[in-house]
Amino acid sequence: MIRKAVIPAAGLGTRFLPATKSMPKEMLPIIDIPTIQYVVQEAVDSGIEDILIISGKGKRAIEDHFDRNFELEARLEEKEDQAWYNEMRRLADMANVHFVRQKEANGLGDAIYYARHHVGNEPFAVLLGDTIMDSVIPVTQQLVDTYEQYGGSVIAVEQVPADKVNRYGIVGGASLSDTIMELNTLVEKPAVESAPSSLAIAGRYVLSPEIFQAIEQTPKGKNNEIQLTDSLLLLLKRENIYSHLIEGKRHDIGNKLDFLKTTVEFALKRKEFAAPFRKFLEELLAAQEV
């Protein structure tokens, strides 16, 4: 039973400057919902309500978002806006959300290490705070199911084009099914000709608590930071690790172009926007073709 989730959200968001100079990248909204709310909702929809967010300097807005706002609630009650009042209460009560600060930007592995006291000796889920998954079955739930079946740490992966392999951490191993692979290697941003596969790590994990010992033994790597991929390689020497090819679509909100694409895709799925927004896009494209 996976009872706890860890959401690393301490990154500086340099790819989204100047917006992220004063606003956490995880609070960038897809229309009207902050990115990290989608991430927390995925954990909750996967049956996990004990969530630790690893934040950092300038991330107070994330804590405020999941806290009660009594003044706002009172104003909504006065206006008899019951729908929004209920939504604000649901947001504050959707999970038991805890926070700890990563004192310096020292890599994803280091950020996860801050969760060791909260997690204890339990397996736990990791959901990157700037990645949204659009799927029928929550991707974290998919990983939990695989963990329960195989009993080892599980890494979410997605198929990427050959010309983009060198942008991602890539896994390799022996296929156990159409979606499951027992890993024998993980390579960070390999050249396409030497990559073990075209399956890229996709920002979701279910990890055994032994990962903390592996992180302790991991030297600083790329960017002089403790890379989670390096820690997973150490863990792989001690226990089985599996990859799960996700059923769904990953949206990297830390990337400006993907952020724009995600906003458009999600807007076209919203009933109140779909028809007029589609018409606007069609008219805009037609005008540019003239």
Image: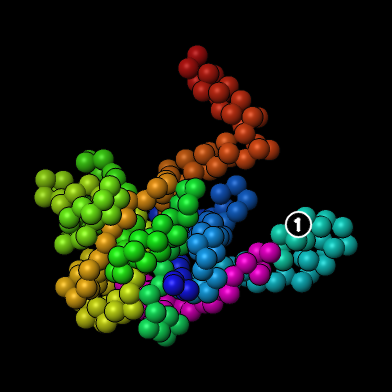
Q: Residue at x 88, y 62 (%)?
A: 78
103 to the left or right of 81: left
**Can residue 88 be seen at all in this image of the molecule?**
yes
Could you say which is closer to the camera, residue 283 or residue 160? 160
**Which percent across, then down, holds residue 258?**
43, 45
In the image as oriented, which residue stretches furthest toward the left? 194
Region in magenta: 90-116
Q: Residue at x 68, y 64 (%)?
A: 90
Label 1: few (<14), some (14–19) or many (≥20) C-alpha neighbours in 10 Å: some
Q: Residue at x 72, y 66 (%)?
A: 89
Helix, strand or loop status at disc 1:
helix
Quadrant in the rendering for residue 268: top right
Could you say which is closer to the camera, residue 167 or residue 20? 167
Quadrant in the rendering for residue 235: bottom left
**Can residue 224 be seen at all in this image of the molecule?**
no
**Which percent across, then down, holds residue 27?**
55, 59
Residue type at the position of mark 1: Trp
**Which percent across, then down, holds residue 59?**
52, 70
Position of the N terminus, as image quadrant, is bottom left
In the image as oriented, which residue stretches furthest toward the front? 149
Determine whether 189 is above or below 70 in the image. above
* Membership of 85 in magenta stretch: no
Could you say which is closer to the camera, residue 90 or residue 25? 90
**Which percent across, then down, holds residue 256?**
44, 47
For disc 1, the marked residue is 84
3 to the left or right of 75: left
Quadrant in the rendering for residue 72: bottom right
* Membership of 101 in magenta stretch: yes
